[in-house]
Image: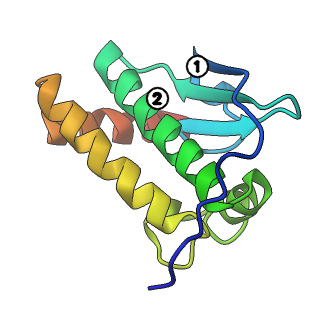
Amino acid sequence: MPTRRYSGGKGTIVRIQIETIPHEAQRYSTTGDWWWDPDDTLHLRVSTLPDWRYSALIAVHELVEALLCKAHGVSVEAADAWDMGPGKEMDDPGYFSRAPYHREHDFALGIERLFAHELDVDWNAYGDALDVLYDEQE
């Protein structure tokens, strides 16, 4: 496995903005999206789900993934190109080893699972709620 060089210390994080939005308002078929503005503001958009804890889990996942991508030098452009290109038809694009942010995604998923446990979220029920969201989109 290739090692990642820490590219932190460059720039600052001016602001982190997390917003829940209707699922159909996402830029593409996803429950969580992130990008950086030129002023180093991190934007997270999370699909609204029936249980606030589910949206919080997605927000934490996206936050961890975005910060790790920044630290490891994975650009928003590279992540978006994968998500909207080869990963477009995949259930979980970050899961696949060819995704430029695969390692960051896997780590974020681990944090998400730990957080779900602390929030007393049933992981299977959470997955079912996400499935319903995508089924409604079709």
Counting from the top left corner in percent of width and height, residue 118 is at: 14, 27
At x 46%, y 29%, the residue is 59
The quadrant in which residue 114 appears is top left
Q: Amino acid at mark 2?
A: Ala
For this rendering, which residue is in front, 30 or 41? 41
Q: Identify the residue at the far front of this view.
A: 9
Q: Is the C-beta separation of discs 2 and 1 under 8 Å?
A: yes
Q: Identify the residue at the far bottom of this view.
A: 1
Q: Is residue 5 visible?
A: yes
Image check: 31 left or right of 71? left
Image check: 132 left or right of 4? left
Q: Secondary structure at mark 2?
A: helix
The quadrant in which residue 119 appears is top left
The quadrant in which residue 42 appears is top right
At x 34%, y 14%, the residue is 52
Q: How many residues crowd mark 1 within 10 Å: few (<14), some (14–19), many (20+)?
A: some
Circle 2 residue? 59
